[in-house]
Amino acid sequence: MSKSMIDVARDTLIKNNHRMPFLDLWNNVSQEMNFTPSQAEDNIAQFYSDLSLDSHFVNLEGNSWDLKTRHTFSESVTDTDSIAVDDDEEDENQETQSEDDE
């Protein structure tokens, strides 16, 4: 039975015992899966989606990936408060720009 891309990624991270930048992980997975360059190009987006949705993996700073079990909760969660946008403030800015354009 052949392994899935996610299975290969999990095995790679276990074997290397540390986080890996996405492209390094992908290059390893695509090599292990014996993908042609065309197949690698066709599968990279699906692999990224699969990593993002699989609860065994965590996306860390710098688009590095690792197994979630090796990281604390605070390391694996992004604080969205710092990136939240106040919709009311954004609407006010758009209204002000519209008035300036008139």
Image (tube, grey):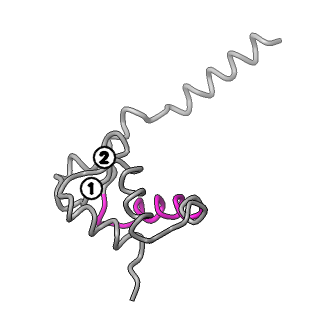
Q: Residues within 10 Å of mark 2 (few under 14, many from 20)?
A: some
Percent of width and height locating residue 34: 46, 70
Kindly report the distance in space between the C-alpha atoms of the residues bearing marks 1 and 2.
Answer: 8 Å
Between discs 1 and 2, the one toward the N terminus: 2
102 left or right, relative to 71:
right
Name the residue at 48% across, 61% down.
49
Assign a secondary structure to mark 2: strand
Judged left or right of residue 87, residue 98 is right
Instruction: Give the labeled residue for mark 1.
Output: 66
Quadrant housing the N terminus:
bottom left
Q: Which residue is mark 2?
A: 60
Magenta residue check for 13: no
Q: Quadrant of the C terminus?
A: top right
Which residue range is magenta in the image? 42-57
Residue 53 place in picture, x, y as percent? 42, 64
- Residue at 39 percent across and 64 percent down: it is 29
